[in-house]
Image (cartoon, coloured by chain):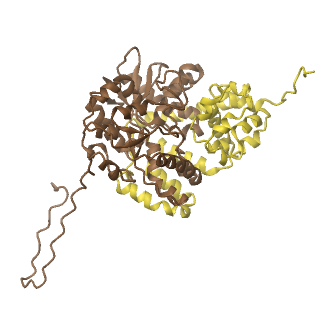
Chain colours: A yellow, B brown
Amino acid sequence: MYPTSYPTVTDETFLAEVMAQTPGGEKLRTCLQCGTCGGSCPSAPEMDHSPRTLFALIAAGEREVVLKSSAPWYCVSCYYCMVRCPQDIPVTDVMYTLRRMSARGGAHADADVADFSRTFIDLVERRGRSFELGLAARYHLTHSPLEKISQGPMALGMVLKDRLSFRPKRIRNLAAFKAILSKAKAIEVRLIAASRGEGH
Amino acid sequence: MAYGYYPGCSLEHSAAAYDDSTRAVAKALGVELVELDDWNCCGATEYIALSRTGAYALIGRNLALAESQLPRTNGKAVLAAPCSACFLNLSKAEHYVATHADLASEMNEALAAGGLHYTPGSVEVRHLVEVLVTDLGYDAIRAKVQRPLSALRVAPYYGCLLTRPKIPGHGVDDAEYPSFLDELLHALGADVVDFPLKTHCCGGHMSQISADTANMLLHRLLKNATDYRADIIATACPMCQLNLDAYQAQVNRAYETSFDLPILYFTQLMGLAFGLDAAGLGLGKELVSAEKALAKIGVARPAPPPAPAKPAHRKKGDKALPMPRKKAHRGRARTS
């Protein structure tokens, strides 16, 4: 005899939150646990949970374990998982959602990656364009610089080949640009509160 | 043919060779590239990792500018991006706002703070290589070839974001085993390597964050291309070029290998095949020199800038009195 009903997870709030913050995220509910995502992932060996395990943990409502996992931070955005998923789950986008949730909660296991993103964003917000030399200098001089001494000749080569500029570029209409981004931040705060069911 | 052109931040500095060669090749092909005025960064893979609305607003500003600045063909403004990450970010966000009304209103609410608005579906974002092979076609490209690359074994490297994720409307043939870059290189007369890892990942920003992960992925690609006796890897992405080129020495140290594989942009190879001047294609800016490989097709390294003239030494036994020498004039003359 086959069972007529299966035990259901009582707490779906975490799953619902992840789905609400990911375009097409509702497909997460259809995960078959086939493992194609993890098998396709070039950085799976570095992750403490494979994407498949992560999705099982999300479905089980294991918020803290998931948000402490290094897996989303090691995702290299290669999208192999996404084109191979038989259920069309936007796996890479779910990883981005988990990074955002983890960074907001301050629980992320691998702080360096989040710092790199923060430094990048900070420089873009100031001028509207990325500043490669500023990013490399600010990030690497504050994150184990001594281990990176061996990268010196490469950096020097980049400078000598005129591939790293000391002068950052900026956009003209910076005031409107900054107004758009600060509005975006306000909208995001409102949306996150809504996805958690606050303010209802 | 005229297209909107979104160069992206890398092409301003570290990948200037890609920008130079793109503009030179477009000119030779009669393709007009109109740079989007006052474009901003696409956010790379960093912005979306910390703020979704911020990432969409950032991309939305570019789409809104494209909508208002560019002429329409079949109701759409076409924006061509040579950087695979910019291409993916802009095209994916466009697809998502066109299919998710809530994302579109979220984006437009932010854009309104800067007096902008984007109508979903009004801009079509395409990768430069896809524009060239689809709209011009291989025959038109072949017709321009003056110096066939037949002596060069070239491994076409697509990387990730050029072919994945497969977004409806992307004119890319296959997400995992595409062939359009192979075909393009064939049209240039190159001996094209059937490169098994052509869509595998270069590690993206991992070269900055986790050297071990980056080294592992880069080693895999360099070994595979070397095993297949490639002289050159051709890329269509500044991040792939940077990782494979600038971190090749680091991979060699970590794996005790001696890879010496130059990484060039496909546009540089197009320019060479068209017989354009090597210096105008940004050649010589790669850290792993392409000089030896390019000698196979008779391309000499661009002449280095003339060294400043050294003052002549006094000859031994010169009995004349030492006189002040006339200084060579250097730099711009001051007017005040």
Q: Quadrant of the N terminus of chain B?
A: top left
Query: Residue at left 61%, top 41%?
Result: A75
Q: How many marks?
A: 0
Query: Residue at left 37%, top 33%?
Result: B186
Up-down: is B101 above or below B143? above
Residue A67 location (% of width, % of height): 71, 42
Up-down: is A180 above or below A4? below
Q: Is residue A183 left or right of residue A199?
A: left
Up-down: is B7 above or below B98? below
Residue A126 visible somewhere in the drawing: no
Write down the quadrant of residue A196 in the picture: top right
Write down the quadrant of residue A28 in the picture: top right
Residue B211 location (% of width, % of height): 56, 54
Residue B131 location (% of width, % of height): 39, 26
- Choose between B155 and B315: the one closer to the eye: B155
Q: Is residue A128 left or right of residue A119?
A: left
